[in-house]
Each structure stands twice: as C-alpha cells, then as structure tokens.
Image (cartoon, rainbow, N blue to C red):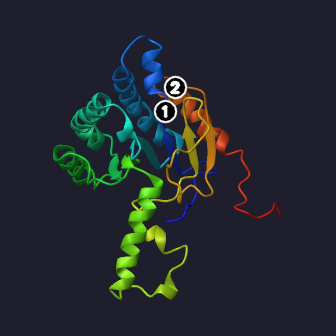
C-alpha cells in the first residue's frame, strides 16, 4: 500500500530504528540488557505521543534477522524481555485503543513468544487508534525474499500471470501489505544507516539520523521531528511546479 500523507503536511506513518540501548547502559556501567529494558519503557511514551502528533502508524524495529549474531545471553535476555513486554502491555494497548501488529519471520522465534504475539494481535484487532507495528526477527532483504517466494508460488499455481507482475504486485506479498509506506524514518544513536529496515517501503521516505540514544529519546523530541517534517518539500522524483 502506498503512502498517503493527509496529516496537514505531517507524516502519517513514522518508522523508528531504536538504536543505542547497549551504549546507554554501558555508559552507566550496567549490562546491555539494562539498556534494552530502559528502551522498552520508552516505547510507551512515543506511542502515547502519536495521536497528539497526528501520526496514525508507528513501526518500531525491535529485533533484526542479524541480531541473532549477538551473544547467547543477550539474545535470550531480549526474547524474555519481549515476552514480558507483550504480557505487561497487552491490556494497556486495548485501553489506549492501539492496534498491534508484528512483522518479520516468526519461524525462528520460540513458541511462547509466538502465542503472545498472536494473542496481542487478536486482542487489539478491533482498536482503531494508533497502529503500532513491531518488527521482530525482521530484515528487509529477508522480507522481500519471502514475498518473492510466495509470489512465485502463485505464478506456478496459475493464480498470477507473470505479465501482470509489476511494482504494485510485490507489496501485496510483503509483511506490511496492510500498512501505508512510512513517510518518515528516524534512527537514534548517531548511526547514519538503515540497517536492512523497510527497504522496499522506504523508497521515498524522509530520514532523520539523530544523536540521541533510544532510552533518552523523549516525546518532545519525537514531536519536534514530526513537526519539522511538514516543512520539507516532497517531490517524489518530480520537480517543483
């Protein structure tokens, strides 16, 4: 689904690469997981800032397909954090009218976590406020590869004519098929790269690379970035008339 920014010039969909949790903890002489717990608490504040900022969709990068390369201790700690976070926040999402979705490949995740993810999506499917999408075991290249495989299977089964495949076809097979493309992508912690996040969807997104570490990222800074987006001229490959 394409991006349809109708938020009085502001971004309808904001995606965030939540980086810097480990460095934030290490600067305080604490283990990396301490930073991840602090970062998880920050998510609530940003979700709550979306309605007042006019943001309908928020997508956050929680765990990438590359993050499995981290130490076994950190990965296990993160998986436990995800389970506790979903369990703790599920009812709060319902109260705040937040629709929760997950994107990414669930095959490698443990069964208990998958059940909690399914429950969160089912419990909030009637919510029509902020749309929160959590990218968990997600990678942009992996997503495109999985989508292409499903598309090829439909072609092989005769459900899709190869002549009808164009740039509007593949998005229908992506994890994000029910979401508009992001208008604004924010990366915290001073790193200026996209790290395999929403590669197809962000073709025309605006980017903000900021120095703030994720646990220090406040709703005030979020609102400021959303507001500054409205001053950008977006031509989508065209020229100013």
Which is more toward the observer, 22 or 171? Answer: 22
Which is more toward the observer, 83 or 32? Answer: 32
- Please identify the residue farthest to the right as the structure is shown: 241
What residue would you read off at disc 1? 19
- Contact (Cβ within 8 Å) of mark 2 with mark 1: yes
**CA separation in Å, label 2 and label 1:** 6 Å
Residue 213 image label: 2
x, y percent for residue 3: 55, 60
- 80 up-or-down from 98: above or below: above
- 184 up-or-down from 22: above or below: below
Q: Residue at x 35, y 20 (%)?
A: 34
x, y percent for residue 219: 50, 30
* Picture quarter with the C terminus: bottom right
Image side of residue 11 versus residue 56, left or right? right
- 85 up-or-down from 7: above or below: above
* Mark sitting earlier along the chain (2/1): 1
Which is more toward the observer, 28 or 131? Answer: 28
Q: Residues within 10 Å of mark 1 (few under 14, many from 20)?
A: many
Looking at the rendered structure, the secondary structure element under dot 1 is loop
Residue 218 image label: none
Image side of residue 108 versus residue 147, left or right? left
x, y percent for residue 150: 36, 72
Looking at the rendered structure, the secondary structure element under dot 2 is loop
Q: Residue at x 60, y 58 (%)?
A: 203
- Please identify the residue farthest to the top as the structure is shown: 29
Q: Which image quadrant for residue 113?
A: top left
Q: Residues within 10 Å of mark 2 (few under 14, many from 20)?
A: many
x, y percent for residue 52: 50, 39
């Amino acid at each position: 689904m394409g991006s349809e920014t109708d938020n009085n010039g502001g971004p309808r969909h904001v995606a965030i690469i939540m980086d810097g949790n480990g460095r934030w903890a290490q600067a305080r002489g604490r283990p990396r997981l301490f930073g991840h717990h602090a970062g998880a608490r920050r998510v609530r504040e940003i979700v709550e800032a979306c309605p007042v900022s006019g943001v309908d969709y928020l997508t956050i990068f929680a765990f990438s397909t590359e993050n499995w390369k981290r130490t076994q201790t950190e990965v296990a700690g993160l998986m436990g954090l995800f389970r506790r976070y979903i369990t703790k926040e599920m009812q709060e999402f319902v109260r705040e009218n937040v629709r929760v979705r997950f994107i990414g490949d669930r095959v490698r995740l443990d069964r208990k976590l998958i059940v909690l993810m399914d429950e969160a999506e089912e419990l909030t499917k009637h919510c029509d406020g902020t749309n929160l999408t959590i990218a968990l075991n997600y990678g942009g290249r992996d997503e495109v590869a999985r989508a292409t495989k499903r598309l090829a299977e439909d072609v092989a089964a005769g459900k899709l004519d190869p002549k009808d495949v164009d740039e509007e076809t593949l998005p229908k097979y992506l994890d994000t098929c029910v979401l508009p493309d992001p208008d604004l992508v924010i990366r915290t912690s001073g790193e200026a790269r996209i790290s395999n996040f929403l590669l197809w969807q962000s073709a025309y997104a605006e980017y903000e690379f900021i120095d703030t570490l994720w646990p220090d990222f406040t709703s005030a800074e979020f609102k400021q970035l959303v507001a500054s987006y409205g001053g950008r001229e977006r031509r989508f490959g065209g020229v100013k008339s």
